[in-house]
Image (cartoon, rainbow, N blue to C red):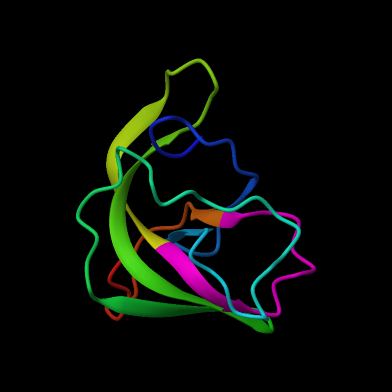
Amino acid sequence: MIGTPAQRLQMLFDTGSAVIYAMSDKCAFDDCPKTMEKYDTRSKSLTDTKEQRQELNYGQGYVSGSIASEKICFSTTGKGCIGKVQMLVGDEGKNLEADKFSGIVGLAPQNDPNNKI
């Protein structure tokens, strides 16, 4: 669950990365995924949207967007929530249509100095 009100998005837990991203409703390019749910950027808990952009490469695809802070919950009960989590709000993507998820929650330790998320 991401945001306020809570948005239920299918996220992939990734033990090989330390980043969190969700494709957003701002993704309007032809290459943006059409079939998955997208993060609604009108969320009341979205804060600290930065002008800074970052691109993430995954397999044969990529996601690009701005860095922001958001509330993320790991259950539907309202428990297990973390506020102000740094994440990438994806507004551009390519070769993601085969993915059956709206974004990634990276669980690996942060070890890339170029990663600003």
Q: In this view, does 14 lie to the left or right of 112?
A: right
Figure disc tally: 0
Residue at position x 40%, y 63% in the image: 88
Residue 48 vs residue 55, the one in the foreground: 48
Q: What is the quadrant of residue 97 in the picture?
A: bottom right
Q: What is the quadrant of residue 18 in the picture?
A: bottom left
Compared with 34, 10 (above or below) is above
Name the residue furthest bottom: 60
Q: Is residue 64 left or right of residue 117?
A: right
Was residue 100 drawn as part of the magenta stretch in this picture? Answer: yes
- Magenta region: which residues? 89-103
Placement of the C terminus among the 4 image quadrants: bottom left
Compared with 79, 42 (above or below) is below
Q: Is residue 69 left or right of residue 28?
A: left
Residue 22 percent coordinates (x, y): 51, 57
Name the residue furthest right: 98
Residue at position x 43%, y 80% in the image: 55
Residue at position x 41%, y 52% in the image: 41
Residue 106 percent coordinates (x, y): 49, 56
Residue 70 percent coordinates (x, y): 33, 45
Name the residue furthest top: 77
Does residue 14 appear in the picture of this structure? no
Does residue 1 appear in the picture of this structure? yes
Residue 8 percent coordinates (x, y): 58, 36
Q: Is residue 106 left or right of residue 3?
A: right
Residue 111 vs residue 33, the one in the foreground: 33
Was residue 113 drawn as part of the magenta stretch in this picture? Answer: no
Residue at position x 69%, y 68% in the image: 33
